[in-house]
Image (cartoon, grey):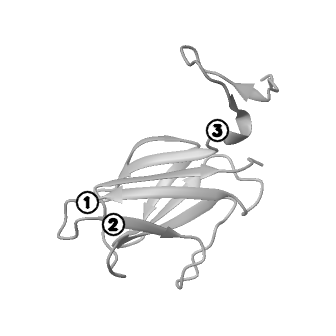
Amino acid sequence: MSTIVISNIKATGETASRAVSGVAAAWVNFNGTGTVAIRDSNNVASLTDNGVGVFTISYSNSMANSNYSGSSGVTTSSAFSQGSFRFGGDSRGITYSTTSLKLVSVNSNSTVDLDCDYCSASIHGDLA
């Protein structure tokens, strides 16, 4: 396989280019209720359901180090009207890893864990 080295990228039909370093290293959209399942993803090998509201995303290709950035969001139709993800260094010892990231979905107004109907996460950083 050949490697193409570039500093900027622009998809067909786009008017603006962006720095390659700004493109997500990994992202995932998944169903976090019932039978947990990935809807769509990039650089995600698997998703593990670790209990109510707790998920582990495993990367297909490892990150270069554990100092990457992540953002996430959840929506739910449960009794809680909104939720949010906590990840990296919470009280359960959840930390960023070069091979995976554990996320905890919680009610935005409390510390109660909850499963989420629509969960997503985006990871930005260097790949190994």
Q: x%, y% of residue 13? A: 54, 14
Query: Residues under labels 2 and 1: Cα distance?
Result: 7 Å
Question: Marks 2 and 1: CB-CB under 8 Å?
Answer: yes
Could you say which is closer to the camera, residue 81 or residue 4?
A: 81
Secondary structure, mark 3, is: loop
Query: Between residues 70 and 65, which one lies in front from this camera angle?
Result: 70
Measured along the vertical axis of the image, is residue 33 above or below residue 4? below
The local crowd at label 3, few if under 14, some if 14 to 19, many if 20 or more residues have their Cα within 10 Å, is: some
Q: Residue at x 79, y 29 (%)?
A: 7
Which of marks 2 and 3 precedes in the sequence?
Answer: 3
Q: Secondary structure at mark 1?
A: loop
Q: Residues within 10 Å of mark 1 (few under 14, many from 20)?
A: some
Label tally: 3
Tell me the tag on residue 83: 2
**Which labelled disc corresponds to residue 76?**
1
Q: Amino acid at mark 1?
A: Thr
Q: Residue at x 78, y 49 (%)?
A: 128
Q: Position of residue 23 (x, y in %)?
A: 64, 38
Residue beneath label 3, please?
A: 23
User: How much space separates mark 1 and mark 3, taking CA atoms?
Assistant: 27 Å
Who's the residue at 31% across and 61% down the image?
116
* Extreme-bottom residue of the structure: 91
